Image (tube, helix red, strand yellow):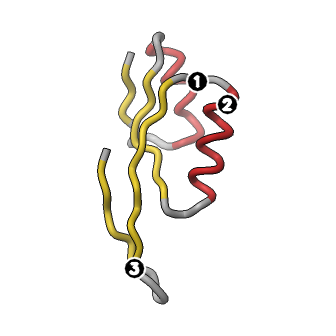
Amino acid sequence: MGYTYKKSQKETFLMIHYAVIGTSPITKAFIAGAEATGKMHLQAIYSRDLQKAKDFSLPYGQDLHLYD
């Protein structure tokens, strides 16, 4: 995916952009854990069914790339 640098008042750190494959509860748990670090940002979702990817992406924002 890609990397960006985020700068806060205290530190500069690497932001990792990542993608997920699938729309299962395990994927949701992975995203929650990754986002909780504050250093990872969901960029793309792949699913065999594009509509499932669209439905799955709703809680995560509008700027995601969706693939089938």
- Residue 9: numbered disc: none
Q: Is residue 15 above or below residue 8?
A: above
Inspect the image, locate mark 3, and give the three-letter code of the amino acid beneath it. Answer: Thr
Name the residue carrying label 2. Answer: 26
Mark 1 belongs to which amino acid? Thr
The secondary structure type at the circle numbered 3 is strand
At horizontal 45% and vertical 81% (from top left) the residue drawn is 8
Q: Mark 2 or mark 3: name the one nearer the start of the chain.
A: 3
Q: In 3D space, how far apart are the residues under numbered discs 1 and 3 (Cα atoms)? A: 32 Å
Q: Earlier in the sequence, mark 1 or mark 3?
A: 3
**Label 3 sits on residue:** 12
Q: Residue 52 at x, y = what percent?
A: 54, 17
Q: Is residue 68 left or right of residue 36?
A: left
Classify mark 3: residues with Cα within 10 Å, few (<14), some (14-19) or many (20+).
Answer: few
Picture residue at 62% right of the left edge, 41% below the top: 30
Number of other residues with Cα within 10 Å of mark 2, as a class: few under 14, some 14 to 19, many 20 or more: few
Q: Residue at x 40, y 42 (%)?
A: 43
Give the image location of residue 26, x and y in percent: 67, 30
Look at mark 1 in the image and give the residue it sits on. Answer: 23
Quadrant position of residue 27: top right
